[in-house]
Amino acid sequence: MAFSGFFDKLKNGLTKTKNNLTGRIMDVLSGTVSIDDDLYEELEEILITADIGVDTTLYIIEKLKEKIREKKIKDPSLVKECLKEVIIDILGNEKGSIEPKSTPEVILVIGVNGVGKTTSIGKISSKLKSDGYKVLMAAADTFRAAAIEQLEVWSSRAGVDIVKHQEGSDPAAVIFDAVQASKARGTDVLICDTAGRLHNKKNLMDELAKINRVIDREYKDASRETLLVLDATTGQNAVQQAKQFMEVCKIDGIILTKLDGTAKGGIVISIKHSLNIPVKLIGVGESIDDLQEFNPSDFAEALF
């Protein structure tokens, strides 16, 4: 797909956030004659309601004031560009990528029910397959009703194989079989759907530890990545979820789904600032190619 097509999808996907954030900022700036405390207060309120979070908002306003002082800006119409620069600085320049650093690779995907975990796995598998990688799915979220059937649907949509046991099976046993199948078939990427029962952190911790021990023992030459799926429509709750998962395991990256369905896209900025975990992929639509690799400057550009 052409770059412009990707960018248009991103821009369209961020329409609600853009209206909520940049639209309101423009309204405030166009009606302002001087840069003063009242203006900063209004901007603060807009940022918080776009789910950027209180701490991140206060940080942004502080950095914005510094920039405006440094550049000796007096004209309110130039504030937007400064704000964009501050946000780009927070997001950094690390582009999200799903390309394996080395093969074979194991990707563990975690996240609570309903965030779009299975759908994300399907979309990642489809993308990797179209990029020429040999992909295998492992259905290790064995306790959630219909999780295995859901993943099977995505495996056939993406055209990749799946390793599964019956509902209620030991997740580590599924991973064991999936690792053996991966080695036998010369798989490049093994993507594992794992549980996300956060209400019982101890069980989740034990389960993930057991899965990781199996991979350590059986698949020594595989690189590994743990990705957490969060639902953008839940706003600051997504940040809280991420903090809880961080207590349970190391997270290498975030997949942020349903950005197209929310005015709370500011959550991307909040995640980067408060957790310092890279956002790797963002979901900006329903179709199989609507999970995009996150590009910070494109995101800021589309937003503004």
Image (cartoon, rainbow, N blue to C red):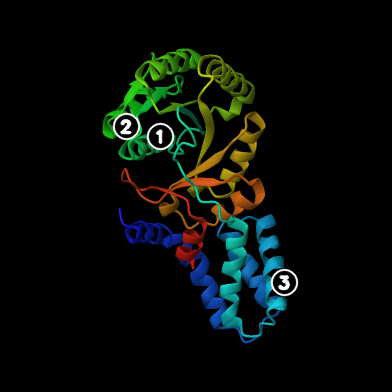
Does residue 210 lie above or below 280 as drawn? above
| Picture residue at 58% right of the left edge, 66% below the top | 46
Q: Position of residue 52 (x, y in %)?
A: 60, 57
- Residue type at the position of mark 1: Ile
- Residue type at the position of mark 2: Trp
Q: Which residue is mark 2?
A: 154
Question: How busy is the neighbourhood of tag 3: few (under 14 within 10 Å), some, or many (20 plus)?
Answer: some
The answer for how far apart the CA atoms under marks 1 and 2 are is: 8 Å
Q: Is residue 257 left or right of residue 271?
A: left
User: Between disc 1 and disc 2, whose residue precedes?
Assistant: 1
Does residue 214 lie above or below 194 as drawn? above
The answer for how far apart the CA atoms under marks 3 and 2 are is: 49 Å
Q: Position of residue 11 (x, y in %)?
A: 40, 61
| Picture residue at 27% right of the left edge, 29% below the top | 156
User: Between disc 3 and disc 2, whose residue precedes?
Assistant: 3
Foreground tag (3 vs 2): 3
| Residue 168 visible in this rendered orientation of the protein | no
| Picture residue at 45% right of the left edge, 12% below the top | 169
| Residue 298 visible in this rendered orientation of the protein | yes
The answer for how far apart the CA atoms under marks 3 and 1 are is: 42 Å
SS for dot 1 = helix
| Picture residue at 48% right of the left edge, 54% below the top | 295
Disc 3 to disc 2: CB gap under 8 Å: no
- Residue type at the position of mark 3: Glu
Q: Quarter of the image holding residue 188?
A: top left
Does residue 47 lie above or below 165 as drawn? below
Q: Which residue is mark 1?
A: 121
Q: Is residue 267 left or right of residue 128?
A: right
